[in-house]
């Protein structure tokens, strides 16, 4: 099973600032990595797939990078609606499909 | 756009059973060519994949934590996914989401995709 590790657990950021979230896989997953955003009481929403491709409706301020075992999600200028929990997920080697433990982006 | 609607959750005693359903609808939906999964989220915790099934139900997978207790199935004529949960434990308490992706004519094992569409979730609480 591929273990996904996200850091930090919590990120405190002021609106308008940049946020950088990290995700590490326990073995290479090439670029088969997705990022999801989850707001309280809502289902996860696909933001990024293929490590760097924005899903339909994802604003351009969200960007993903990385391949192999190290990945990054960057939010260039945080808006109020971006404060949420972000999960990475690998879909290279399944089953099982595995998720990171999440990074909470909160208002500083 | 695909919409998924889960139902069947509730409060059950330890050792009890529940059956979840996930009804799919929407323009462009080809349910029978979509891989579907159940993903759960314990209170205050992260996402954990539970079980998955291919479009024609030929391939079925379970997380070790539910193997032998949960059964996934689907009825493509009704565009519906199911999860039969038996021998429930307190640690099964979670919001259960159905989620999936379309893989079309590509072989089920040949495609690698994230979960494109998700339901809103249904709460399962196991407690005496």
Image (tube, rainbow, N blue to C red):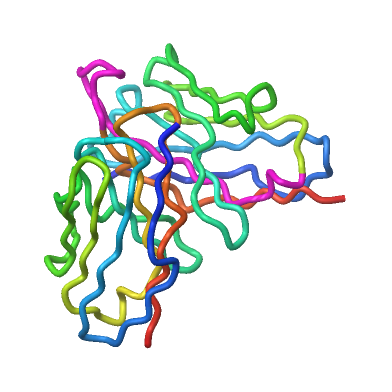
Q: Residue at x 83, y 35 (%)?
A: B15
Q: Nearer the viewer, residue B120 or A71?
A: A71
Residue B10 locus on image (x, y percent):
71, 49
Question: In which quarter of the view is residue A102 placed?
Answer: bottom left
Side (left or right) of B2 relative to B85:
left
Q: Residue at x 33, y 55 (%)?
A: A36
Question: In which quarter of the view is residue A30 placed?
Answer: top left
Q: Residue at x 59, y 31 (%)?
A: B83
Side (left or right) of B15 relative to A68:
right
Residue B29 locus on image (x, y percent):
28, 34
Q: Residue at x 19, y 60 (%)?
A: A58
Is residue B107 one of those drawn in magenta? yes
- Above or below, A73 against B47 in this view is below
Magenta range: B90-112
Q: Nearer the viewer, residue B47 or A55?
A: B47
Question: In which quarter of the view is residue B19 placed?
Answer: top right
Task: Single out the residue that lies furthest toward the right.
Answer: B128
- Above or below, B87 against A15 in this view is above
Residue A99 locus on image (x, y percent):
42, 46
Task: Single out the residue that lies furthest toward the top.
Answer: B58
Residue B59 locus on image (x, y percent):
43, 15
């Amino acid at each position: 099973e591929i273990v996904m590790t996200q850091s930090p657990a919590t990120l405190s950021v002021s609106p308008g600032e940049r946020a950088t979230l990290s995700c590490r896989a326990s073995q290479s997953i090439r670029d088969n990595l997705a990022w999801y955003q989850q707001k309280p009481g809502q289902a996860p929403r696909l933001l990024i797939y293929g490590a760097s491709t924005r899903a339909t409706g994802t604003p351009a301020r969200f960007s993903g990078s990385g391949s192999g075992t190290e990945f990054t999600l960057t939010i260039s200028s945080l808006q109020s609606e971006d404060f949420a929990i972000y999960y990475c997920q690998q879909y290279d080697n399944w089953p099982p499909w595995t998720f990171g433990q999440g990074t909470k982006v909160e208002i500083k | 756009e695909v919409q998924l609607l889960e139902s069947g959750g509730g409060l059950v005693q330890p050792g009890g059973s529940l059956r979840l359903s996930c009804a799919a609808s929407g323009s462009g939906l080809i349910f029978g060519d979509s891989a579907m999964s159940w993903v759960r989220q314990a209170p205050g915790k992260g996402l954990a994949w539970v079980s998955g099934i291919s479009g024609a139900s030929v391939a079925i997978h379970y997380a070790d934590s539910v193997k032998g207790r949960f059964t996934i199935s689907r009825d493509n004529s009704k565009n519906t996914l199911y999860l039969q949960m038996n021998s429930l434990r307190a640690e099964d308490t979670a919001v259960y989401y159905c989620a999936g992706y379309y893989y079309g004519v590509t072989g089920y094992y040949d495609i690698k995709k994230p979960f494109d569409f998700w339901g809103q979730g249904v709460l399962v609480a196991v407690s005496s």
